[in-house]
Amino acid sequence: MPRTTLSGQIAGQIRASILDGSYPLGAQLNEMELASAFGVSRGPVREAMQRLIQEGLLRSEPHRGVFVPELAPSDLIDIYFVRRSLELVAMRRILETPDRGGVVRDLAGIVRQMKAAVRRKDWAQVADLDMQFHRRIVDEAGSERLTRSFATLQAETRLCLQMLMGGYSENAALIDEHQLLVDLIERGAIEPALAEMERHFGDPVRTLHKANASRKEKLGAEAA
């Protein structure tokens, strides 16, 4: 098997483990241990880790090692600032296009899947579908460069969602917010849709504090 293919497969497995929380935020990844676990030499593992560093899913710290990054509130603010800018541009272009039937059907289908995932309390799946929903909006704008810019944020956004996951289970309005966006796109209501998208992003730092409080409460209950 070519090394590039092998390193890509290893990167995919490590990526999945980061995004599902198997490697939690702040965890250190050891190249030798990973090579042993995958039954390969250290070369393809090193290449895989470098790829994930470029994606923002790992962070190399000199003289310390490679870690799953712990995003600070300032990181959340910056990531959501860029996301908001990209998605509002995409939303405006969609709303100025007469034929929106395809994207409306796709987004409505994603919302139905989100409802089912919420009923199962499968918050990891909810996060995946949330990303699919917003990526579909960006893709519909039909700009290769806009899509490429959004793609560079996806990994870091997923880390954000992992941090904010505690806020998902407390957010009963999550489905309603996405459904409202679908309805406004279908109606072609430009200013209301843009305003709702702006409101939808909310305050990620406040959501982070809420998620952290929820986690602490859960840990306290388990300890008791």
Image (spheres, grey):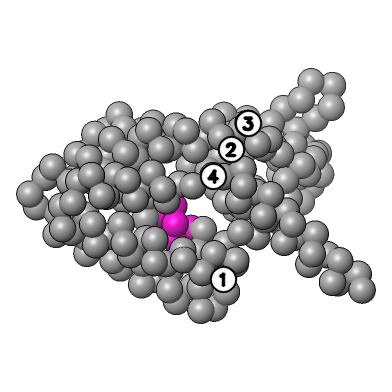
How far apart are labels 3 and 2 at the CA level? Answer: 5 Å
Q: Residue at x 67, y 56 (%)?
A: 211
Residue 122 tag number: 1
Circle 2 SS class: helix
The number of numbered discs placed on residues in the rendered structure image is 4
What amino acid does circle 1 point to?
Asp
Local secondary structure at mark 1: loop
Tell whether label 4 touches label 1 (CB within 8 Å): no
Please rate how many residues cluster around mark 1, counting C-alpha atoms within 10 Å: few if below 14, some from 14 to 19, many from 20: few
Helix, strand or loop at mark 4: loop
> In the rendering, at what x and y percent does residue 32 appear?
81, 39
> Is 26 colored magenta in this rendering?
no
Query: Could you tell me if residue 105 is visible in this image?
Result: yes
Residue hosting label 4: 203
Residue type at the position of mark 3: Ser
Q: Residues within 10 Å of mark 4 (few under 14, many from 20)?
A: few
Neighbor class of circle 2 (other Cα within 10 Å; few <14, some 14-19, many 20+) is many
Dot 3 and dot 4 residues touching (CB under 8 Å): no
> Magenta part of the protein: which range?
128-132
Viewer-side residue, 138 vs 35: 138
Query: Gap in Å between the C-alphas at discs 2 and 1?
Result: 23 Å
Give the amino acid at mark 2: Leu
- The Cα atoms of the two marked residues, 1 and 4, are separated by 23 Å
Query: Which circle's residue, 3 or 1, is located before the other in the chain?
Result: 3
Q: Of 170 and 159, which appears nearest the observer?
A: 170
Q: For the residues carrying marks 1 and 4, which lies nearer the camera in this image? A: 4
Q: CA distance from mark 2 to mark 4?
A: 9 Å
- Contact between labelled residues 1 and 3, with CB atoms less than 8 Å apart: no
Q: Which mark is residue 74?
A: 3
Specify whether 173 is left or right of 219.
left
Q: From the image, tell me which residue sits under label 2.
A: 76
